[in-house]
Structure formats: structure tokens, C-alpha cells
């Protein structure tokens, strides 16, 4: 008999306890622009999400698309400044952000999930007032901080067997306002409001590293705070760990920061003993 078949059957068998544990689980997956890669990586991500749905989980995808926004802004000759990891967003920029995130990127992910045999519906934070924001910081312009979440639309979608795909663009308290929301922030707020079982933050680094440069597979919020105070957690990892801590405070059971470039990263994390990346929980 072909050895690969035996290995496949064993892998499936070993996944049984995990499949049982995660039946009905709500898993919010943040798919960042840097983790999106090429068409093949997109197709593989979509297959993982469809598989999660197929085995009875309720995946909710929240995406980014920073590199795709950069590309279009460059074509239009608009420059971006960054302050503390967020794009300073003026009126012209927020229009491009909405076009790229709600249009190009959102529909590309929806299409990939449909191609993998799932059912997906793409929305943004504007739809059904899912995510209502106020200005995060006057210095940042139209960058939103979620202040009111209405997640029933997500439950309605997944209870109907549909995978929601959410673009991090939101409405404001005033009429006709549009906010650009950092993708990690949006995913954390959605996971918190859903009291999700898992928030998976797919990124392009291996996870949270200690002084020795080794990936920490498990961390508590206290350890994260202590490593941040000592400067071991720094730079681009800070918005992710801050999102993780806030989501845990809001009732998410565990947050995993994992490398989206690893093949089948979500499956590796959810369905094997090995796991992937850094799991943070109290
Ligand atoms: C982000 C939204 C997209 C995003 C931006 O304008 O790039 C802010 O910075 P990634 O791919 O997850 O980085 N918004 C306020 O978060 O994309």
C-alpha cells in the first residue's frame, strides 16, 4: 500500500479529538495582506477555512490588505505616513482604502472560498452597522476605533452555513462617515464581541519570540506584559499582542499569533498536537 495513504488516514484519525473539541466553535481568523501571498497561498487558505466549516466549526474571516492599498495609492500618486503602525488616513486615502478592501481584496477572498466549495458572503464593518467607530486619534485622520459592535449579522450568516468575510472599513456615529480600521484591531473587536473560542492572527512572522529568538508556544497575558515592558516584544508585534490582550479581556478564550506563510497554518494549529505560533491565554 502507498505510504502516503496510510499517513493520510493516520493524520485524520489523530485529528478526531480536535475535531470533536471544536464542533460549533467560533473561530475568528485575521488574514493579513502580508500573509496573502500569491494565488496558490490564497487558494490554500480558502481550503483550510472551508475545511473548518465542513467539520462543524464557525469560521469568520477578517482581512487586511495593507500592501494592496499601498500599491493603488502609489499608482494614484498619494503618499502615506504611518504613526504607531497605523496609516494616517485623509479623505482621498479613505476612499482608496474602502475601494481596495471592500472591493478588490474582500471579493478575492470570497471568490477563493467559493472556488474551494464553500459558501462565503463578503461584508464590511458598515453592513448592518457591524462595527461603528469613532476617530482613534486626531493625528490619524479617518482611522477608526470600534466603539459599538453589532455582531448578530455574523451569527445569522454562520448559522445559515455561510462564511462571513469582513473588510476592516467602518461607519461612524455621524452620517456618511467612513473609517479605516487596522485589520488586527477589527479582528480583535469582532472576536471579542462574539466571545470567540479562538482568534487566529495570521501574520508573516513565526510568532512571539523570547530573548533567545525562540518562538514561545504558550504565553499568559502577564508574560506578554512583562516581555513588552522589558522590550523583548517590540515593533510590529506590539499591535498584535495588544489586540490579543484586549480580546482575552473581552472574553475570547485564546488568541494565537501564527505564521500565515506556513502551509495549512490554520489546520496545523487547530488539528494537531504540534500547534503553530504562539498561543496566549490566561
Ligand atoms: C490598514 C487597513 C488594512 C490592514 C491600512 O490602511 O493599511 C490602518 O492602518 P494588513 O494587511 O492587515 O496590514 N489600516 C488604520 O490592516 O492591512
Image (tube, grey):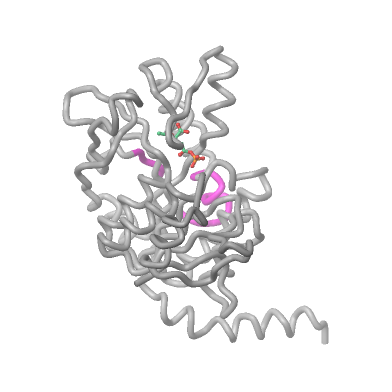
Which percent across, then down, holds residue 89? 39, 23
Quadrant assignment for the C terminus: bottom left
| Nearer to the camera, 229 or 125 | 229
| Nearer to the camera, 221 or 257 | 221
Residue at the image point whose x is 38% and y is 57% from the top: 244
Left-right relation of 74 to 239? right
Which residue lies most toward the top here?
77
Which percent across, then down, holds residue 215? 59, 65
* Magenta highlight range: 110-124
| Nearer to the camera, 62 or 259 | 259
Q: Is residue 70 above or below residue 193?
A: above
Which residue lies most toward the left here?
174
Q: Can residue 120 be seen in this snapshot?
A: no
Residue at the image point whose x is 63% and y is 64% from the top: 212
Quarter of image, res 3:
bottom right
Q: How many marks?
A: 0
Which residue lies most toward the front here?
230
Left-right relation of 248 to 73? left
| Nearer to the camera, 213 or 156 | 213
Residue at the image point whose x is 53% and y is 20% from the top: 73
Which percent across, then down, holds residue 50? 51, 60
Is 102 one of the magenta-colored residues? no
Left-right relation of 213 to 162? right
Quadrant assignment for the N terminus: bottom right
Quarter of image, res 255:
bottom left
Which percent across, then down, holds residue 35? 59, 48
Q: Can residue 30 be seen in this snapshot?
A: yes
Amino acid at each position: 500500500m502507498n505510504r502516503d495513504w496510510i499517513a493520510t488516514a493516520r493524520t485524520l484519525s489523530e485529528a478526531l479529538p480536535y475535531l470533536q473539541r471544536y464542533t460549533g466553535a467560533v473561530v475568528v481568523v485575521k488574514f493579513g495582506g502580508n500573509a496573502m501571498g500569491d494565488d496558490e497561498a490564497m487558494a490554500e487558505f480558502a481550503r483550510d477555512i472551508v475545511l473548518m466549516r465542513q467539520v462543524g466549526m464557525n469560521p469568520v474571516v477578517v482581512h487586511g490588505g495593507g500592501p494592496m492599498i499601498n500599491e493603488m495609492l502609489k499608482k494614484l500618486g498619494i503618499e502615506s505616513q504611518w504613526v504607531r503602525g497605523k496609516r494616517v488616513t485623509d479623505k482621498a486615502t479613505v476612499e482608496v482604502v474602502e475601494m481596495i478592501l471592500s472591493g478588490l481584496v474582500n471579493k478575492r477572498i470570497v471568490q477563493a472560498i467559493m472556488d474551494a466549495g464553500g459558501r462565503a458572503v463578503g461584508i464590511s464593518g458598515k453592513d448592518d452597522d457591524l462595527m461603528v467607530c469613532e476617530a482613534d486619534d486626531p493625528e490619524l485622520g479617518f482611522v477608526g476605533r470600534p466603539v459599538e459592535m453589532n455582531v448578530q449579522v455574523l451569527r445569522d450568516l454562520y448559522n445559515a452555513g455561510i462564511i462571513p468575510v469582513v473588510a476592516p472599513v467602518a461607519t461612524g456615529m455621524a452620517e456618511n462617515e467612513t473609517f479605516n480600521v487596522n485589520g488586527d484591531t477589527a479582528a480583535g473587536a469582532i472576536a471579542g464581541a462574539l466571545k470567540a473560542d479562538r482568534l487566529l492572527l495570521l501574520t508573516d512572522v513565526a510568532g512571539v519570540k523570547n530573548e533567545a529568538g525562540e518562538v514561545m508556544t504558550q504565553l499568559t497575558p502577564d508574560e506578554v506584559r512583562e516581555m513588552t515592558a522589558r522590550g523583548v516584544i517590540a515593533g510590529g508585534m506590539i499591535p498584535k499582542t495588544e489586540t490579543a490582550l484586549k480580546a482575552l479581556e473581552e472574553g475570547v478564550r485564546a488568541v494565537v499569533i501564527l505564521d500565515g506563510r506556513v502551509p495549512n497554518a490554520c489546520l496545523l494549529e487547530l488539528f494537531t498536537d504540534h500547534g503553530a505560533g504562539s498561543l496566549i491565554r490566561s
